[in-house]
Image (cartoon, helix red, strand yellow):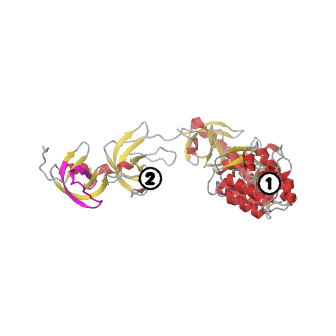
């Protein structure tokens, strides 16, 4: 089979000859030209195959489509398109790049681009984005800036819009696209984000041109922290792994390598940017005895004070000694104190916590000592109460356990009423604090929830709420509630709004009797009859058999009926349009 001419004139003869050269055992020239033109989309729609074949190959070549779809280099096929073998498509992209970008062979790029964009418009946004990366790679001599702009938008989507699921696509794109695509700053940032999410990623070198500060700050906020050790001797600042010499620790984003900015204060401040790779050893910068600021990649600044005139010990070393001594004292006294949970360990075996009283000091909270019933992540960003259970002062390693407050219902009793503030509203109900009513004290942090749930079915007698968030109370409002149940084992208190008021059914059943005549509006029309409002929150049924044949009563119409039957146990009232007496009446 031969390729023949180019009906639309999209490829120059030189480019066509280049693309027709055998590749990976494929020798059919028409097949090779068509496959090269389809190599940028990760999923090739069948409509694109048809249009591209008509544009590049002469009439009578319909069979090439079938040959291509059944070829060995088609890895997978679906109802809406197919994907090419990764190795083969990489070879095609490399050949196309050498021809178009490197050697400048002519092609109607605008027409080709328009055709591809038209037929890939229905693909998922991330697949279209991947195609645009490939197009830039094969057509642009200097594709780096274009690719970096595209990937920068991806970073912003992840960091600013919290669309972290995009990282799954990024991890796949790292393996599908040519390695040359991922040499810019945005690619490096995305690789760090994938690593933090536990996704596969390539090991990328620090970009030659660095990384934009705004981009870094946006992305680094999503990364967990690791610790860098510091030491000053009055001449230099040394940064590296924590150890006996570098005892002062600062948290920085867990990336490799790490970038820190050191500002030495003085008459003329000196700023130094340092790339820290812990695998190659510590780095040093002259700072003398002056005060120093260290800014990490997320924008946090740590201040190291000026050396005192009468000492050779750095002020931060003295602070660390005091902190470790105080933690040691609290360990031996089994004292509890506050800690902030910062992240879950990648292994899932514990959490890292920091201490508001001791900035820069962190500790391990093992999963077995966290006292959580579900995922550890529910504690992240929460303040908890902890106690030191182990400590290694030389290595500054601290292990703590969580000491949560104990739940109690205090003096609260089932059947009683109390007034309390609304603490939360969710779709299934409203939470009301019972702390004051039960004679209990709310704990500022990491205490048990001292509030009970008013389920949406317990809000009103007269209305069934499908979403309790629409119920007209606000957070902080004082409301009257009735205690329905106390389950100490499950630490739950069940409350009710509506039971603080009389049940309209009880009131109505005490007033309505068989044979009474009542008038009310039709509130619902169903196949088995009409519901008539006889009192607020109480509807009675008029069955079609109790009305003249062909009767129609639209919603809102007033009708006058007689009470045919009353069933107190089932809470049902039956109506009739037939006046009494009735043959079966008691």
Q: Is residue 140 above or below residue 573?
A: below
User: Could you say which is closer to the camera, residue 190 or residue 170?
Assistant: 170
Badge 2 crowding class, 10 Å Cα cut-off, few under 14, some 14 to 19, many 20 or more, is: many
Tell me if 242 is positioned left or right of 583 in this view: right
Is 540 on the left or on the right of 27, as rendered? left
- x%, y% of residue 213? 73, 59
Question: Which picture quadrant has residue 244?
Answer: top right
- Number of labels in the image equals 2
Q: Residue at the location (40% across, 41% down)?
A: 409
Numbered circle sitting on residue 425 = 2
Q: Which mark is residue 207?
A: 1
Residue at the spot 52% in from the left edge and 45% down from the top edge: 446
The part of the chain drawn in magenta is 535-564
Q: Earlier in the sequence, mark 2 or mark 1?
A: 1
Query: In the rendered view of the protein, which quadrant contains the C terminus?
Result: top left
Q: Position of residue 346 (x, y in %)?
A: 66, 41
């Amino acid at each position: 089979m031969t390729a023949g001419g180019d009906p639309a004139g999209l490829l120059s003869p030189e480019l066509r000859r280049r693309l027709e050269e055998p590749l990976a055992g494929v020798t059919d020239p028409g097949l090779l030209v068509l496959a090269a033109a389809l190599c940028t989309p990760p999923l090739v729609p069948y409509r694109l195959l048809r249009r591209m074949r008509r544009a590049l190959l002469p009439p009578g070549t319909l069979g090439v489509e079938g040959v291509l779809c059944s070829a060995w280099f088609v890895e997978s096929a679906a109802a809406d398109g197919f994907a090419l073998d990764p190795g083969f498509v990489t070879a095609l992209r490399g050949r196309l790049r050498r021809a178009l970008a490197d050697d400048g062979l002519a092609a109607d790029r605008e027409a080709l681009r328009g055709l591809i964009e038209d037929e890939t418009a229905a693909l998922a946004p991330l697949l279209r984005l991947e195609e645009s990366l490939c197009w830039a790679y094969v057509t642009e001599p200097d594709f780096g800036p274009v690719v970096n702009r595209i990937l920068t938008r991806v970073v912003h989507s992840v960091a600013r819009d919290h669309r972290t699921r995009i990282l799954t696509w990024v991890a796949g794109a790292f393996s599908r696209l040519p390695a040359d695509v991922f040499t810019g700053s945005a690619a490096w940032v995305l690789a760090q984000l994938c690593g933090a999410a536990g996704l596969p990623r390539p090991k990328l070198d620090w970009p030659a041109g660095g990384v934009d500060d705004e981009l870094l700050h946006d992305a680094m906020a999503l990364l967990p922290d690791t610790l860098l050790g510091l030491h000053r001797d009055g001449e230099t600042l040394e940064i590296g792994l924590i150890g006996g010499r570098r005892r002062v620790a600062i948290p920085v984003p867990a990336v490799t390598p790490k970038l820190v900015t050191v500002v030495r204060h003085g008459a003329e401040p000196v700023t130094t940017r340092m790339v820290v790779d812990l695998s190659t050893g510590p780095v040093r910068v002259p700072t003398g005895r002056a005060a120093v600021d260290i800014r990490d990649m997320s924008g946090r600044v740590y201040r190291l004070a000026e050396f005192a005139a009468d000492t050779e010990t750095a002020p931060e070393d003295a602070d660390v000694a005091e902190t470790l001594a105080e933690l040691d004292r609290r360990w031996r006294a089994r004292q509890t104190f506050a800690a902030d949970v910062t992240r879950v360990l990648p292994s899932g075996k514990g959490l890292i916590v920091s201490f508001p009283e001791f900035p820069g000091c962190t500790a391990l909270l093992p999963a077995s000592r966290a006292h959580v019933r579900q995922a550890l992540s529910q504690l992240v960003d929460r303040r908890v109460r902890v106690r030191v259970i182990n400590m290694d002062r030389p290595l500054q390693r601290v292990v703590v356990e969580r000491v949560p407050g104990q739940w109690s219902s205090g003096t609260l009793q089932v059947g009683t009423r109390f007034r309390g503030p609304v603490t939360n509203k969710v779709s299934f109900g409203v939470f009301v604090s019972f702390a004051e009513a039960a004679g209990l004290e709310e704990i500022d942090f990491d205490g048990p929830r001292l509030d009970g749930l008013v389920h949406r079915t317990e809000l009103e007698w007269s209305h069934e709420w499908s979403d309790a968030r629409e119920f007209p109370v606000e957070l902080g409002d004082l409301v009257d509630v009735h205690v329905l149940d106390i389950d100490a084992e499950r630490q739950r208190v069940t409350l009710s709004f509506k039971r603080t008021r009389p049940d309209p059914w009880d009131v109505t059943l005490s007033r309505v009797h068989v044979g009474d005549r009542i008038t009310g509006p039709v509130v619902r029309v169903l196949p088995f009859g009409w519901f008539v409002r006889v009192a607020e929150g109480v509807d009675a049924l008029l069955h079609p058999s109790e009305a003249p044949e062909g009767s129609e009563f639209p919603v809102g119409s007033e009708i006058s009926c007689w009470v045919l039957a009353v069933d107190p146990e089932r809470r049902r009232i039956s109506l009739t349009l037939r006046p009494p007496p009735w043959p079966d009446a008691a």
